[in-house]
Image (cartoon, coloured by chain):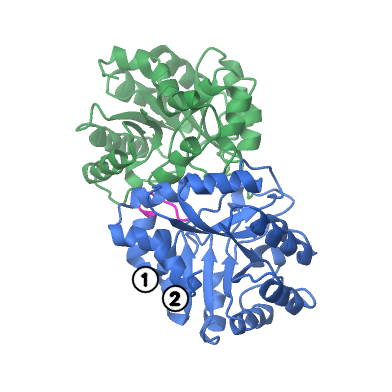
Chain colours: A blue, B green
Amino acid sequence: MADYDKIDTNVYLSRYPFRRLPGDEPAELVGKLRRGGVERAWAGSFDALLHRDLATVNRRLSDDCRRFGNGLLVPFGSVNPAMPDWQEELRRCHEDYRMPGIRLLPGYHGYKLGDKAFVDILGAATRRRMIVQIVVSSEDERTQHPMVRPVDVSVAAGVDPIRSTPGARVQLLNHNHRTPADLAKKLMAAGEVYVDIAMVENTHGLDTLVKAIPPERVAFGSYYPFYYWESAALKVKEAALLGPQELAIFRGNARRLMGDGR
Amino acid sequence: MRIWDLHCHPSTFGSEDPLKAMTDVVRTADRMGVERMCIYLGSLRHYDPNPVDLEDHNNWILRAMKPFPDRVFGFAYLNPNYLQKSLAEIDRCVRDGPMTGVKLWVAKRCNAPELDPIVEKCAGLKAVIFQHTWIKTTGNLGGESTPMELAELASRHPNVPIICGHTGGTWEIGIRAIRANKNVSIDLAGSDPSNGFTEMAYRELGPERIIYGSDSGGRSMGSQLAKVHGAEIPEGAKPLIFAENLRRMMLPILQAKGIRA
Ligand SMILES: [Zn+2]
């Protein structure tokens, strides 16, 4: 598994609100990713789930990505389009911190993909040529903390906004069994939409997925450190894909989504 | 490293046919380095199976096992709501048949007195007792046990080994619930590959009460293997979790049946 230089599109820094995780110190996280053969990791911040002051969340994220990993960590800040003056947060992510994309958390931030808030931020980020990652789920609803129960994002409502935003580049993170293949295909037909594999489950989950949707839209993502990093890598092994397809998932597809060789 | 999978459902691999399903299971297990699998539940998914359904389930597993005597261990599906039939299925499938354990699912909460004769009968045969448990934030099914209820049952039979299926899913509570019951081991299978699960289990229960399982095909073998391969625990504990703890538990019944292990 270490033979490929991988791009991991789904990692987090800082603290999950409900437990400490092995690997939630950035130096440890970087070590783990390197041992797995990861050359780039697109990193969000767990603080963005519940903190309201996203400006400092994004600043810390940017600082940590610069301080640790020698360029391994690529920051994806979080912006909440349901909050006042989100445009300034987006501007800082883009202009001050040079982030290539943002990570949206509609489940925690309380809006839907059919809402004007999403349409607006998708348009604004696309005009800045930023990738928009949408976190579909953060935890199995059956194990959520009983006092904090965000619902999984319904992605069906995203089809129209994506279709009407030419040039949008979108990745669904932790997309799961709630997005059936025909809906995923519809999303991918609406624009440049990718998914990651962190929450793809079942014994034939990944090999079925790459047969059901365009395989060039599937990118490696581990959801580390919330999940064991090995989960995503072992799922690729289990799927027994052809060499070129495996390489595309580990690296090629994420590179194309990033677009500029970063 | 030798890997035994405590928790596998061939009927969820996409074929209703036991032989086709098992061929797929074995191919996937080979790929992932899994040597032996415990299999249970036939192609029906009855939460509260009647006596006829129970037999159908177990016959499906008997057919699936047959060509793979050195590869899989079958467990008999029981329903405490039909106690006499359950005891008869233990006789048919375990005492007089090739199976080596029992699976209790979601028909009845496991602190009920109907479980006592089942546990006693299994103990006499040294059969593995596997009880599904969950603690669901969204609410358990009516007959779906929690690890706390399993601890009640285990306290009534302190010398009988019992397995806490899924560790309750919400493992931070599940591990605590059975911590004091030294006869209870936990099953790692069938929850998200949440980082820290195996580490907490190791810390609170030690290396000898943790058993690897996948819950495949409803889960990826890879995502579940990651819970041990990726765990930050001493490397020496991993062979115990992956195979030796289950093997130690099963050896008496395997030897009695002449199964090599
Ligand atoms: Zn199961």
Q: What residue is drawn where x is 64% and y is 48%?
A: A26
Considering only vertical position in the picture, is B1 above or below A210? Answer: above
Instruction: Identify the image quadrant of residue A61.
Output: bottom right
Q: Are marks 2 and 1 on the same chain?
A: yes
Q: Chain of mark 1?
A: A
Per the image, the residue denoted by label 1 is: A214
Query: Residue at coordinates 30% horizontally, 43% vertically from top-left?
Result: B28
Direction from residue B52 to residue B134 in the image, left or right: right
Which residue is labeled 2 in the image? A188
Q: Is residue A147 above or below residue B126?
A: below
Q: Of the numbered discs in the image, which one, if any, rests on residue A170?
A: none
- Is residue B42 left or right of A15 when viewed as pictured? left
Please report contact status of discs 2 and 1: CB closer than 8 Å, yes or no. Answer: yes
Q: Quarter-wise, where is residue A84 in the image?
A: bottom right
Between discs 2 and 1, the one toward the N terminus = 2
Name the chain letter of the residue that bears numbered label 2. Answer: A
Tell me the kind of residue under disc 2. Answer: Met
Say which of B143 and A21 sits in front.
A21
User: Is residue A133 visible to the viewer in this orientation of the structure?
Assistant: yes
Query: What kind of element bears circle 2?
Result: helix
Residue B127 sits in quarter: top left
Magenta part, dominant SS: loop
> Residue A239, image x and y in percent?
34, 52
